[in-house]
Amino acid sequence: MRSARLASDRTSCHSATANQVRLALHTAAFWPMHTLRAAIPEAHALAKAEFTTLRLRLLKFAARVVEYGWRIRVHLPTSVPEMALFRSLALRLSPSG
């Protein structure tokens, strides 16, 4: 079984250094995903979802990103199924929120 669906248990490289770098990258990917899942309200269906489900439902979609000085605006497509949850999480996790 893969650890948290981030493939941190996969050490298929022949080099120990490459395997250590892979593990470090997967560990670094775990914390933002864990923070995202922890910020979802407990009443929501995705509150206990696996990381793969969160990635597919909340993070894997096309968006237009526009930078305005210190502000970044993400223009979402109209077909994002979890747009309300995405917006509430973005506001909750923003540095000013």
Image: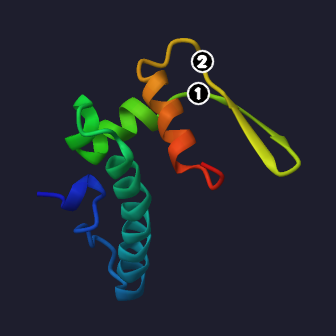
Q: Position of residue 32 (x, y in %)?
A: 44, 58
To which residue does mark 2 refer?
A: 77
Query: How far is mark 1 from mark 2, CA to CA?
Result: 7 Å
Q: How is the image coloured?
A: rainbow
Answer few, some or many: residues within 10 Å of disc 1's Cα (few below 14, many 20 plus, some between 14 and 19): few
Question: Counting residues from the N terminus, which is met first, the one under dot 1 or under dot 2?
Answer: 1
Q: Which mark is residue 14?
A: none
Q: Secondary structure at mark 2?
A: loop
- Identify which residue, 90 or 24, lies in the foreground: 90
Q: Amino acid at mark 1?
A: Ala
Residue lying at the far front in this picture: please name it: 97
Which residue is drawn at the image coordinates 44% and 69% (left, top)? Answer: 28
Q: Position of residue 49 (x, y in %)?
A: 23, 40
Disc 1, disc 2: CB below 8 Å? yes
Quadrant in the rendering for residue 4: bottom left
Residue 56 point in image, percent of width and height? 37, 33
Q: Residue furthest left?
A: 1
Seen in the picture, residue 39 relative to 42 is either above or below; the reply is: below
Query: Which quadrant holds residue 58?
Result: top left
* Outermost right residue: 69
Horizontal relation, residue 24 to residue 11: left or right: right
Residue at (18% x, 58% y) in the render: 2
- SS label for mark 1: loop
Residue linked to disc 1: 62
